[in-house]
């Protein structure tokens, strides 16, 4: 898929810009704090309706404005697709080809993106919450119905937690049983989807990591659901129910829900050793890169088209070998948007023909092509 052009109004430090993108590589150059990350973030938001760096949608609206508007024209295998997203203090409105989508699951998935930014190291090094967010965002864009399932689960979880906080044995036992059943039902579906996704991602990531490290390292991604997963969906549900019943007292005492997908985690291993604890900084970086490159292939496999790749200030951070591997992955097949403060440490030979843009104080100018 190709994002042919896009437009921003009152988004972060952009008053109004319109960009005509090249089908292959687009490079945005500018000093710090000019709006480069904001620009890549806007493409991510246009695709997923959420930012990769904040939970607060209001931060995306330009200061002292009431609403931000993002729109894009996307060229997909089946034709042109128009996306419009409006973010206001009251909420969001998403339109696909001029039709408002009441459910975000009707919108997410039209544009697939993979973002690789310096903070992606946190997927390896950070807290379990970062890894769950990563999982959820990635699964949602490949399987839009997952968004609906996740929203349902979060509602049930909030209600169960509210019940657990109001500690009153007699009255609430029946209610807790009802919430537990709903939680187990919805949670089982989420965990199975996560397991399937990781199984597929693992295959690609292992292959890519092996190639980047020239056969020295075997990468393994292990999913840790908080309930043991079995092949049969009914069995997962039953296991989940057993766990919740056995631990009801503990949950009451702690006043919160302790089992379910909101407690899941992922682990990364290189040659059998856990990367978070034993990996060098370089191995952690390569793991994050392999996972991101694996996502590109996974989306291609599941959706039938390559996603758009967003590289925020990462090229110059990579050594020559990893930079070359990365460029080779997207070259000629994946439309890519790159930000950088300068071209000094970038392998320009590999990026011939890329369209160049200068970014300055919320304004963008096309300044030619790499020759
Ligand atoms: N809601 C907003 N309204 C207006 N300006 C904003 C808003 N949010 C952030 N900014 C401004 O955007 C600028 C930061 O832009 P951005 O994060 O894209 O920088 P950058 O060009 O990627 O720089 P760096 O290379 O340092 O990452 C800052 O000057 C910040 O004050």
Image: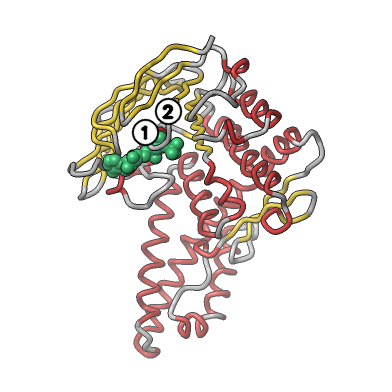
Q: Callout 2: 10 Å neighbours few (<14), some, many (20+)? A: some
Quadrant of the rendering where the C terminus is positioned: top right
Q: Nearer the viewer, residue 178 or 96?
A: 96
Percent x, y of residue 239: 59, 69
* Left or right of 216 on screen, residue 4: left
User: Is label 2 in a helix, a strand or a loop?
Assistant: loop
Coloring basis for residues: secondary structure
Q: Are marks 2 and 1 in contact (CB under 8 Å)?
A: yes
Q: Nearer the viewer, residue 84 or 340?
A: 340
User: Which residue is pictured at 73% across the width and 36% down the height?
Assistant: 207
**Label 1, on which residue?**
34
* Left or right of 341 on screen, residue 158: left
Ligand 1 closer than 8 Å to label 1 CB? yes
Percent x, y of residue 67: 21, 41
**Label 2, on which residue?**
30
Q: Is residue 369 visible?
A: yes
Q: Is residue 44 visible?
A: no
């Amino acid at each position: 898929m190709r994002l042919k052009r896009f437009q921003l109004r009152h988004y972060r430090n952009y008053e109004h810009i319109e960009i005509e993108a090249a089908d292959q590589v687009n490079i945005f150059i500018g000093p710090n704090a000019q709006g480069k990350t904001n620009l890549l973030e806007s493409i991510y938001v246009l695709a997923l309706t959420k930012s990769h760096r904040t939970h607060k949608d209001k931060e995306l609206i330009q200061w002292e404005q009431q609403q931000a508007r993002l729109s894009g024209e996307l060229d997909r295998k089946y034709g042109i697709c128009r996306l419009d997203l409006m973010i206001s203090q009251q909420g969001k409105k998403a339109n696909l080809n001029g039709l408002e989508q009441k459910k975000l699951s009707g919108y997410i998935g039209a544009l697939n993106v993979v973002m690789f930014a310096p903070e992606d190291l946190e997927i390896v090094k950070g807290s379990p919450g970062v890894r769950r967010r990563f999982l959820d965002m990635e699964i949602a864009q490949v399987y839009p119905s997952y968004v609906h399932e996740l929203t349902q689960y979060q509602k049930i979880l909030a209600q169960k937690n509210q019940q657990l906080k109001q500690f009153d044995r007699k009255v609430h036992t029946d209610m807790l049983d009802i919430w537990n059943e709903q939680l187990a039902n919805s949670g089982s579906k989420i965990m199975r989807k996560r397991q399937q996704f990781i199984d597929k991602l693992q295959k690609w990531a292992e292959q890519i990591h092996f190639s980047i490290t020239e056969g020295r390292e075997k990468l393994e991604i292990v999913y840790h659901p908080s309930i043991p997963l079995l092949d049969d969906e009914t069995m997962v549900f039953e296991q989940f129910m057993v766990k919740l019943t056995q631990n009801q007292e503990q949950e009451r005492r702690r006043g919160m829900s302790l089992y379910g997908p909101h407690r899941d985690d992922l682990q990364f291993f290189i040659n059998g050793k856990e990367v978070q604890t034993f990996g060098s900084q370089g191995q952690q970086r390569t793991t994050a890169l392999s996972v991101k490159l694996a996502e590109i292939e996974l989306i291609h496999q599941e959706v039938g088209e390559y996603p758009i790749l967003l590289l925020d200030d990462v090229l110059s951070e990579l050594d020559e070998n990893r930079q070359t591997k990365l460029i080779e992955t997207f070259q000629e097949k994946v439309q890519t948007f790159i930000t950088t403060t300068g071209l000094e440490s970038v392998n320009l030979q590999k990026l011939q023909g890329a369209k160049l843009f200068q970014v300055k104080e919320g304004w963008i100018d096309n300044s030619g092509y790499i020759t």
